[in-house]
């Protein structure tokens, strides 16, 4: 769940390397170092894509365990990923998962879960 947050950290690290009155040497050094940060950012995205099937299987086979992990989301990007995962599922098919998320720590995620539960027949 933290891959998007870590990508944001990479973006912030890149942005923090640049300043207004940089010398040419400082600018060149920042450009070289930003290559590594961009690579790391890309790898976090690939990790999220590669782990998606395993995460989907966990959500399907062990909803209580998955809910315990999703409940810990507190950053906005984490919670957004959780909401996307839940939004990809029919509310009725994710009843056990939703039940385990009623005490989500992130307010937006908790509200999303509440709304999804209300959509249940």
Image: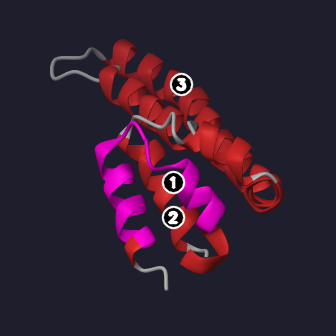
Q: Position of residue 67 (x, y in %)?
A: 62, 46
Residue 73 belongs to the span the image colors magenta: no
Q: Position of residue 43 (x, y in %)?
A: 69, 41
Q: Is the residue under label 2 in contact with that under label 1 (CB below 8 Å)?
A: yes
Label drawn at residue 17: none
Between the C-alphas of marks 2 and 3, the distance is 35 Å
Between the C-alphas of marks 3 and 1, the distance is 31 Å
> Which residue: 52% across, 32% down?
6
Label drawn at residue 81: 1
Q: Is the residue under label 1 in contact with that under label 3 (CB below 8 Å)?
A: no
Q: Report the magenta residues as a range.
A: 95-117
> Which residue: 44% across, 69% down?
117
The secondary structure that most of the magenta stretch takes on is: helix
Q: Nearer the viewer, mark 2 or mark 3?
A: 2
**Would residue 106 be found to the left or right of residue 60 on screen?**
left
Indicate the secondary structure of the residue bearing disc 1. helix
Q: Nearer the viewer, mark 3 or mark 1?
A: 1
Label drawn at residue 84: 2
Q: Is the residue under label 3 in contact with that under label 2 (CB below 8 Å)?
A: no
> Which residue: 36% across, 29% down?
12
Label drawn at residue 32: 3
Q: Does the rendering let one see residue 90?
A: no
Residue 98 belongs to the span the image colors magenta: yes
């Amino acid at each position: 769940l933290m891959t998007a947050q870590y990508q944001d950290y990479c973006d912030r690290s890149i942005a923090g390397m640049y300043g207004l009155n940089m010398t040419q040497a400082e600018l060149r050094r920042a450009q070289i170092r930003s290559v590594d940060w961009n690579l790391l950012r890309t790898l976090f995205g690939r990790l999220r894509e590669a782990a998606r099937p395993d995460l989907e299987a966990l959500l399907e086979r062990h909803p209580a365990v998955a809910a315990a992990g999703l409940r810990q989301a507190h950053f906005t990007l984490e919670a957004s990923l959780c909401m996307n995962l839940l939004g990809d599922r029919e509310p009725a098919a994710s009843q056990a998962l939703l039940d385990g998320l009623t005490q989500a720590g992130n307010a937006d995620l908790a509200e999303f879960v509440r709304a999804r539960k209300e959509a249940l027949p």
